[in-house]
Image (cartoon, rainbow, N blue to C red):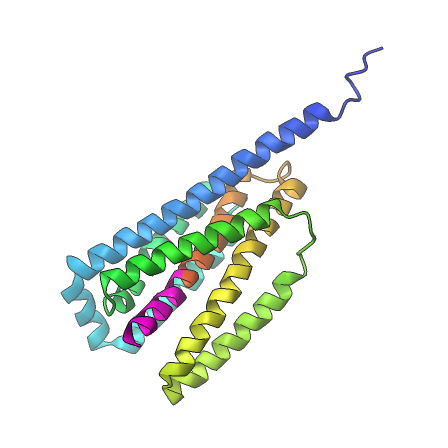
Amino acid sequence: MNNFQNDPQPRTINTQVGLRSFLSKMYGFMALAVLVSAATAYVSMTVFAAQIQAAFGAHPIWALLIFIISMFVMIGGIQRNATRNPAMSFTLLMLFAVIFGVEMSITLSLYTQATLGGAFVAAAAVFGTMAVIGNTTKRDISSLGTHLFAALIGLLVAQIVNMFLGSAMITYIFSYIGVVIFAGLSMWDSNNMRRMYLQYGDQVSSTGLAVTGALQLYLDFVNLFLYFVQIFAGSSRD
């Protein structure tokens, strides 16, 4: 009688190896997307600054609408094709990172290098910490996502209202709230993608699933960075 046939240890080891490979791939894709956005934003603020400013200055509303629509189309394309065509989804993720980098360059050009550098380090530290917690916690935090998304919607509505009020203090306070929300989402998305791989990893393309996770984590990190930019800029003015 072969006692090793019913031994669950080999399957557990294979699962852990597959999970590590999946997480490495997902965070690698996410880091590459951040790097592409950073490089695009830098080139946009230096080499093509005049052209981009002219395009946005001539038709600011239309330019903003085109960016928003194109990003939503690509997000939908990435999520819809992730498991069916991972290569296409990866290409769309990189294209999304380029477009988001161009859009961010308009805002980031208003701040100093010290502010941007400090915000990036802070965002990376917070994101890394929350991602580790999300991947290692034994607690069930699946319900946390609903509360975080509700808080995010409330924050977006409040920010739209503040656009008409024009209060710098409210903007500063909202920046801290935004950091808390996206720090929580970084933890929740990391934990959620880990659970999804353990549940569906042997049924779908792990690369496609990694691209989907990379998109979510990219958005978490970028928003953390943008809110930290506002915090560092506000602190430097005090």
The residue that appears at 43% across and 72% down in the rendered structure is: 175
Q: Nearer the viewer, residue 15 or 203?
A: 15
- The quadrant of the picture occupied by the C terminus is bottom left
The majority secondary structure of the magenta stretch comes to helix
Say how many tags the image has.
0
- Name the residue at the bottom extreme: 165
Above or below 237: residue 166: below
Above or below 217: residue 147: below
- The quadrant of the picture occupied by the N terminus is top right
The residue that appears at 55% across and 35% down in the rendered structure is: 20
Question: Percent from the top left, x then y, of residue 33?
Answer: 38, 49
- Name the residue at the right extreme: 1
The residue that appears at 26% across and 54% down in the rendered structure is: 40
- Name the residue at the front extreme: 238
Quarter where residue 57 is shown: bottom left
The reply, left or right, for residue 207 in relation to residue 102 is right
Above or below 54: residue 128: above
The residue that appears at 20% across and 55% down in the rendered structure is: 43
Residue 226 lies in magenta, yes or no? Answer: yes
Q: Nearer the viewer, residue 227 or 88?
A: 227
The reply, left or right, for residue 161 in relation to residue 51 is right
Question: Percent from the top left, x then y, of residue 5?
Answer: 78, 18
**Looking at the image, can residue 74 be seen?**
yes
Residue 96 lies in magenta, yes or no? Answer: no
Quarter where residue 66 is shown: bottom left
Read off the magenta span: 225-238
